[in-house]
Image (cartoon, rainbow, N blue to C red):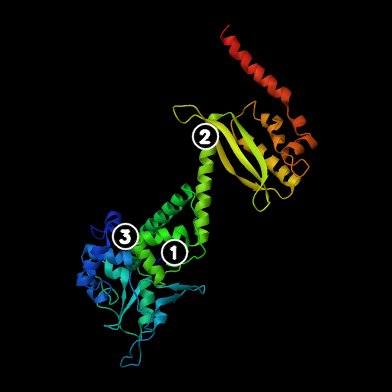
Amino acid sequence: MKDDNEDSDSIHPLSSRASIENLNDDDNKSLSSHIDIFDPRCWDALDSKMIDVLVIKGPQRDKSIQKGLKNKFGRRFVSDLYVRILDNGEVQDRDWLVNSKELDKVFCFCCKIFKKGYVKGGLVNEGYADWTHVAVRLQEHEVGLEHKKNWATWYELQKDHWKNVLLRIICIVKFLAKHSLAIRGTKERLYENNNGNFLGLIEMLAEFDPIIQEHVRRITNDDIHIHYLSHKIQNELIFLFASSVRSEIVKKVRQAKYFSVILDCTPDVSHQEQMSLILRYVDLTSSFVVIEESFLGFINVNDIKGKARDFFGTIQRIYTIFAHSTKRWQILKDNSYLRSSISQERFNGLGLLAIENDYLEKVAHEDLVEDFVSKNSRRLLLFT
């Protein structure tokens, strides 16, 4: 996630999140037509708005240059300088290092852009071309305090940019889920036929939204490989949405205090037996009293008794979570368990399980009744 960027209030006044989000494509074209913002030779002449555009797009490397021209000592630039080997053997990309083909010099992008005043060093000013000592110089520079500060500033801008990208992706997934629209197609690549509604909306946003436009440009140019458009990310977002909705339902049920659980088993089109879980409760969050039924999900029932036994424990935990109520075991005595429990000439589900294992006998009904009576007796004494 080190390929995007966005703002810094302390560096230049226009480098803010709002100004970056408001940059449109016309601004980019007008700026690029006058000056090449990707050329390190022009970075000292950039104004605040140009810097904002450069920060969004990031530095560009000419990947075709693997080796530069040799100097009089037979030394030259090599693309291996773009990576750093850590002490533990890890390979780290020096994303801040940029090579100028015209000058045959290397620059530090973040220090060149975000420096305050004059800073000594070729990497920050006119460029560095001492290929004999370049490896040592890069190591010294990247551990310097000033470089770390400038890199941190650049990194914060990248975080803001990724937040904006994720915000748009989340909004698209939320829109599709809210309207019960299919997310994926038969293809999972941008600008391919039948790639689904999700990628189609990404392509549509890229026509006018500068954030997604730049994100798509980097994907199509292979500048980044972490793009958050895969089906795994889509599934994770859907799971998070479902968890949020489920938490809101549980919150309403807690406030309602009295509720019932509706369970039903039915096969789907593939003849897979499924159990649906629905909560019925009174919604007290609005000014009008409304009876709500909230669907919580399906549970595949492969082993009728085994799954039912597991789910019985789930129901017990559900009742334990909510406020204490004398009616919380009433569902187990409700005949609705058995209304649709006959399938293939046999009983299935919790109805038969409760009968076979005498779960209802284990419930302390007398204690519940005595508790209920004592509470109501105290209420009567208050009015006598």
- CA separation in Å, label 3 and label 2: 40 Å
For the C terminus, which image quadrant?
Answer: top right
Q: Residue furthest top?
A: 384
Depth check: 154 or 207 in front? 207
Quickly name the residue at label 2: 252
Residue type for callout 1: His
Quickly name the residue at label 3: 208
Q: Quadrant of residue 104?
A: bottom left
Residue type for callout 3: Phe
Residue at position x 71%, y 31% from top? 335
Look at the image and tell me whether residue 357 can be seen.
Answer: no
Residue at position x 45%, y 50% from top? 174
Asked if the residues shown at circle 1 and circle 3 are in contact, with their CB atoms under 8 angstroms apart, the answer is no
Which circle, 1 or 3, is nearer the viewer?
3
- CA separation in Å, label 1 and label 2: 37 Å
**Dot 1 or dot 2, earlier in sequence:** 1
Residue at position x 64%, y 51% from top? 269
Tag 1, which secondary structure? loop
For the N terminus, which image quadrant?
Answer: bottom left
Q: Classify mark 2: residues with Cα within 10 Å, few (<14), some (14-19) or many (20+).
A: some
Depth check: 74 or 259 in front? 259
* Left or right placement of residue 267 versus residue 6 in this view: right
Q: Position of residue 144 (x, y in %)?
A: 35, 69
Q: Position of residue 44 (x, y in %)?
A: 22, 71
Quickly name the residue at label 1: 227
Asked if the residues shown at circle 1 and circle 2 are in contact, with their CB atoms under 8 angstroms apart, the answer is no
Q: Classify mark 1: residues with Cα within 10 Å, few (<14), some (14-19) or many (20+).
A: some
Q: Residue furthest right?
A: 356
Residue type for callout 2: Lys
